[in-house]
Image (cartoon, grey):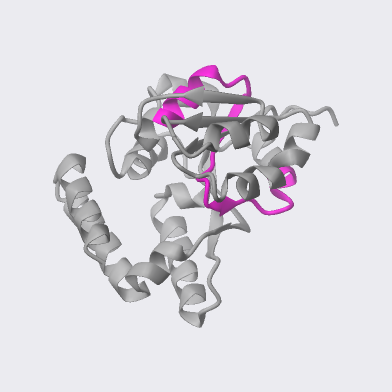
Amino acid sequence: MPESLSLSVVVPVWMEAASIVDCLRPLAPLREAGHEVIVVDSGSTDGTAELARPLCDRVVQAKKGRAVQMNAGAEVARGNVLLFLHADTRLPDNALDELRWFELNEPTWGRFDVRLSGQRPLFRVVSWFMNKRSRLTGMCTGDQAMFVRRDLFEALGGFREQPLMEDIELSRRLRLVSRPWCISSPVVTDSRRWEKLGPWRTIFLMWRLRWRYWRGESPESLSKVYRSDVRND
């Protein structure tokens, strides 16, 4: 069967020198298979871009902001499927095989299940609920390594360039086109934020922000709440 999948992995980064090599090195098999990895930096001063350059196909500079950066990466991407990967998230070993199945089927976008990296039993429970909620609602988050067919992404105008909830906002529009293709092989995302703030506090913060966003509060005001909460830890 001929290869129909042409994948572009877009990785937005800022000040990730300590982890960028660990992020990009596992993506080498994708590049060896003919797919591309694009790193979008926003003016890091710690050498992130220099460390990334040998391990990706292209380093792009963009204004700070995850939505802005991901749009900038998508703009120069060549693949027919775009996958947006956070720098603290690792794809499963069988990601490429799973994405080939997606490409051969009707859904136009999707995501992976997610697993938090920490060893606490509570993290397994949290991960289960995150994945279950996503399957029931059709809403996905950036931690789940969202992917979308490029023509649809462009037709929808990409991510709304807002400081928070850009993944939820895009999911809302994508869900009008089709339900997400959910891959059960999990990505592993770093649990540092959960460990720093505490699992229950993090859960409460995320649900509170999503509730206020659903009620119509602006992403700009929610971003201030989020950053204030994190800084005051």
67 relative to 145 in the view: left or right: left
**In which quadrant of the rendered view does residue 64 lie?**
top left
Which residue occupies the foreground of this view, 25 or 208? 25
| Residue 182 in magenta stretch | no
Q: Where is residue 54? Give x, y as percent.
A: 69, 31
From which residue to which does the magenta span run?
69-98
User: Is residue 152 among the parts visible in the rendering?
Assistant: no
Q: Where is residue 30? Give x, y as percent.
A: 74, 37
Q: Which residue in the rendered view is the most extreme toward the right?
A: 1
| Residue 84 in magenta stretch | yes
Which residue occupies the foreground of this view, 17 or 65? 17
**In which quadrant of the rendered view does residue 193 lie?**
bottom left
**Which residue is at 48% across, 39% downward?**
46
User: Is residue 155 among the parts visible in the rendering?
Assistant: yes
Which residue occupies the foreground of this view, 78 or 229? 229
232 relative to 69 in the view: left or right: left
**Which residue is at 48% across, 67% downward?**
127
**Which residue is at 50% across, 51% downward?**
144
**Which residue is at 85% across, 31% downward?**
1
Instruction: Judge whether 92 appears above or below 77 on screen.
Output: below
Instruction: Judge whether 151 appears above or below 169 on screen.
Output: above
